[in-house]
Amino acid sequence: MLKARRSVFLTILMSYLCILLIPVIIGSVFYQRVEAQTIENANRTNLGLLEQAKAVTETQMESIDKMTNYLALYPKLQWLLSNGADKSPEDMVKLIDFMKDLQKYRNVSSFDSNFYIFVKESDLIFTPIAKTDSRTFYTQLHTYKGRSYDWIMEHYFQGLRYKNYFPVETTETLGETPVQTITYVQSLPINDQSDIKGYLVINIDEREIRRLFQQIEQLHQGEVYIINERNEVLTSTAKANAWDSGLLQRLDHSSGYTQIERDGQEMIVSYTTGENDWKYVSLVPKPVVMGNVEELKTRAIVLLMICLLAGFAVAYLLAYRNYSPIRDVVHTILHRRSDQANAVNEYDFIKQSVIRSMEEERQLRDTIARNAPVIRANFLTRLIKGHVDAEAMTDESLAFMDVRLSHDCFIVILADIEDCSRFMKDDSEEEWALARFIVSNLCTELFQDSLARLYIAEMDRNLLGVLLNFPADHSLSTDIRGKLDELMGIVDLRFRMRMTVGVSGSFAEAAEIAQGYQEATLALDYRMVYGAHAVIFYADSKQYTPLSYHYPLETEIQLTNYVKTGDFAQAEQVLEQIYEINFVAHSLDRRMGLFLFHDLLSTILKTYNSIRVHNQETFEEAANLDPVHFFANCLTAREMLEATKGLYRQVCTSVKAERTDPSDRFYARITAYIEENFGDSNLSLTSIAEHFDVTPQYMSSFFKKKGGQNMTDFIALTRIRAAKKWLADKSLTVTRIAQEVGYANEIGFIRMFKKYEGITPGKYSELAQNELKIKDV
């Protein structure tokens, strides 16, 4: 027994040493590869962080460029450049207005500290709060440390300057702490290269850029430099400017990384180039990157020594154990014996643990098999949206979800179910699920064949995503438009549902599926141009280029005058002309169309500021208007136009009512009260007279004289007009409509409706439904 135990001891110990030494040998062989991979990963990380910093910086610079364009085209600035200083009291007033207007452009970007305009002819500098000559400004009010006045004039204001950024300088504004600033200079006029009349100057506080880099914690241990297109260091996070100008010659690509040695220390250099040819460069000491690897190596050696000692002790103890439990464990693993007696030693515990693990594995596999459809649907949703790394997908994982992407052509289709009112009754989740199921089955029947593969995912309650995968020479690439038109017809005629379909372009790789999703989404957005309930291809939508819309100042003034006089007919005619010119004659694209309608709403707001009336309810509603929410339910340009016209009509009506005599205003109040309360069954001549504190006799004679009809007839016609709108909706009964318009029962409603319209409400509803069907066809 002792020899056997010694044999077991030696066997276990030697096996343990062999197993332990294998990873040691492998680790030493691949250590250099790990080091290289670590450096590469660090470079990629730094490059990604630089891209993040570049994106934020360029976004802020774009806002500065926008402010430059706004100021450069500002009419009062053109007057200032042409007239120079104030030469008359009228010029002084214009100058004061101009300086007040400059206040609007402050803090356009979080980067800009202050800005001013230098008029070259008059040698004057204008800020939002002051005006002075250039020498006084640069020698007393705003000085550059260590720079003379002549240096400033020669360095910044000589010749053409087009969006030039100059390296950081220490500036001090009177009464404030000196700061490090980057100087931005733009010559004016902006498009004139020969006759330069002035310059726009913006001082960018370097602390804002430093704060941006400080938010990126991984760059704290290194140095970051921003190099402009003239190879000048605009700013850096280094405590001292240790930039080597010769290093720039090695950064000859748009982005990448390399290694250099500086002051005896190895540095890892990562860099990227922005759209304005600026280079963003980070220098990180190599020991900082390799610190974790070296620490891990030291810990591995210590752990190895501990494992050697522990392994010797464990092998010694195991040798004196009865090794029959080992035989039982092997037998249990091979034959999966089901007995589970209470564990009497560690081996018995391992045996029972193995049995439990096997049982848990079986249960887990059963659970996965039951949830495979849910997993597949979730995977397809994330794949179409681009949340799955296509390169990381394996054939095994795709086969588990019954997905095969073996063909070389991909197309993404988005089906937006917009109108189900004729199909649904309660607008419940069950009905929406049935609607999605119907559309999914129809897509499967139309597109599925022996070669093409179709995968459908629910993107939202009313949105289905369809991924088509088929060979490039397949007929589906040319028949897809016809199949989608057939799908739209079946969904509309058989199931009374309306939807809009967006189709992406064709792609040759699975990694571009996310781009297809973006294209299909963009195609859906172009329903404003093509109209709702249409099949929109991304390739067709690209023909709409972002043209400038037609809404000149003269037209806006004309429209404002019509609103001020309450002439909605003329205002409506101008709005129709604007629509015809921009959307019918020139096919304005979606983005510029939104800008146009936002401008039309801004005209209402500006008109509100210039109107002074007693009844401000309508104008307060316009003043609190949110353009995003106002157009939220509008899908097409025509719908946006009608919504805009409705607001103009409301404002014009209120203005016109305010401008009329007291009797006209009193009549307008009476009719408005009837329009708001016609659904009240107690509404009558007596109740209206009591509401306005007059006698019924006076109310009846006044209304008859002013409106030309009896009040009873007016109330009845108002109710019938509202009922006719609801009768077009087949889901509402005649009894329900009668109650909504103020009748106690349907008998009185039918009698009154037939008196004024000549037909019964049921017959009118039938005619309205037939007319809607004809329009849909």
Image (tube, rainbow, N blue to C red):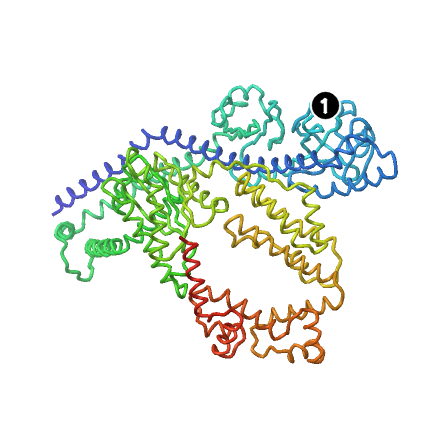
Q: Nearer the viewer, residue 619 or 497?
A: 497
Asked if one can make out residue 71 in the rendered structure from this viewpoint, the answer is: yes
**Residue 135 against residue 323 in the figure, above or below:** above
- Binning the other alpha carbons within 10 Å of mark 1 as few (below 14), some (14 to 19) or many (20 upward) gives few
**Residue 364 vs residue 432: left or right?**
left
**Residue 289 against residue 159 in the figure, above or below:** below
- Assign a secondary structure to mark 1: helix
Q: Residue at x 17, y 40 (%)?
A: 11
Amino acid bearing label 1 = His
Q: Quadrant of residue 185?
A: top right
Q: Position of residue 408 (x, y in %)?
A: 30, 34
**Residue 510 vs residue 288: left or right?**
left
Q: Which residue is mark 1?
A: 155
Q: Position of residue 168 (x, y in %)?
A: 67, 30
Q: Residue at x 45, y 43 (%)?
A: 523
Asked if one can make out residue 346 in the rendered structure from this viewpoint, the answer is: no
Q: Residue at x 57, y 70 (%)?
A: 717
**Residue 617 against residue 587 in the figure, above or below:** below
Q: Position of residue 551 (x, y in %)?
A: 64, 42
